Amino acid sequence: MSGQHPAVHRDPALPRSVTVYEVGARDGLQAESALVPSVAKIDFIRQLRAAGLPWVEATSFVSPRRVPQLADAAEVMAGLGGELSAHPVLVPNRRGLERARLSGARAVAVFVSATETFARRNLNAGRDESLEMARRVIEEASGAGMRVRGYVSMCFGDPWEGEVAIDDVVSVSRSLVDSGCAEISLGDTIGVGTAGHVTELIAAHGRAGIGPELLALHFHDTYGQALANAAAGLRSGVTCFDASAGGIGGCPFAGSATGNLATEDLLWMLSGLGIETGVDLDKVVAAGAMMTDLLGRPRSRVATAMLG
Ligand code: HMG
Ligand code: MG
């Protein structure tokens, strides 16, 4: 270890560089009972972008009645100014896409579930119906020159349905790829996945023609497995990982979802492996601590170690 960074020990079997996709301002804040002022959100997002994160998901254009925490989506986008191509936003339907376009968004993310129950709870539509809703959004957004990411939730287990068949996840991913998504983020919404499951899921996608270059991994850390699961994903060739500064996160429609993998914890591991991210760890630690302090939440493991 040198100062406040880990000593580097490379593993030639792992990718040389990785994209970290920051979700704190969206996944992190959507489940908080406290309403964070828009100016604090804008400051948080700006700090994360200034830390070198290439993608900082900003907010969601969903029903403000169902997710009041993100009802200020348009204000947040306006406050971010011109550089909006680095700030994807969640859109559930064409109404959300229209609101996102009016706000100047250049990249969007649709979200569907591998399971029927969560599709209904989260999107008020069955799994096939929500896939069709996503397809229409993807088509329209791509036609408008926007980059579209597709999230698949409940890939590793569902609190109502239990185990989730790998084939079900792959078929939902396939449908999103066929509809035109540039990237598929596989979500462990409730954090029950373990490393071998990650390896199997990625291999099954590969057999269906969806290679690791098309995938991102999105881990919630309920059972403390997120970092181990990210390491398994790296070993399978995935080079995009979702994470949330300060480890904040959850889903208001899946009670057992807790915080996301903390960006600073992920960066510490990647830095120790000599894997390039282009991201400044100290700046992410400062941004994450600012937000966890504001929310009255514990700091991430790395922020605690570095800042006390
Ligand atoms: P709906 O079918 O219209 O039904 O909405 P509703 O009763 O839920 O609608 C509520 C109200 O929202 C209605 O208006 C609609 O017109 C309106 P009201 O009658 O109250 O005046 N509405 C909208 N308003 C603004 N923007 C829109 C919009 N659409 C309808 N886009 C809908 C369906 C999907 C919109 C709704 O169910 C919803 O907003 N759900 C929220 C879903 C959500 O944000 N979930 C969390 C994000 S997903 C996640 O966290 C998982 C992820 O992190 C990956 C992982 O961890 O697995 C991505
Ligand atoms: Mg999530």
Image (cartoon, helix red, strand yellow):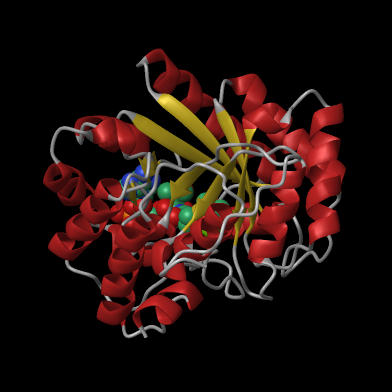
In-front residue for pair 64/164: 164
Q: Position of residue 158 (x, y in %)?
A: 73, 63
Residue 182 shown left or right of residue 304 in the figure: right
Compared across the picture, whether 35 is left or right of 282 comes to left
Percent of width and height locating residue 143: 41, 13
Residue 168 image position (x, y, % from top left):
81, 43
Query: Above or below — where is 251 with respect to 168?
Result: below
On the image, the x and y values in percent for residue 265 come to 52, 65
Farthest-out residue, front: 2
User: Residue at the location (72% across, 29% down)?
Assistant: 174
Taking the image as drawn, is residue 48 in sight? yes
* Residue 118 or residue 232, whichever sits in front: 232
Q: Is residue 281 left or right of residue 82?
A: right
- The residue sitting at 54% across, 33% down in the picture is 134
Q: Is residue 302 left or right of residue 8?
A: left
The image shows residue 168, relative to residue 230, as above or below, that is above
Residue located 73% across and 40% down the image: 12
**Image height of 67 relative to 106, above or below:** below
User: Who is closer to the viewer here, 272 or 24?
Assistant: 272
Q: Quadrant of the C terminus?
A: bottom left
User: What's the residue at 34%, 76% (across, down)?
Assistant: 292
Q: Can residue 65 be seen in this snapshot?
A: no
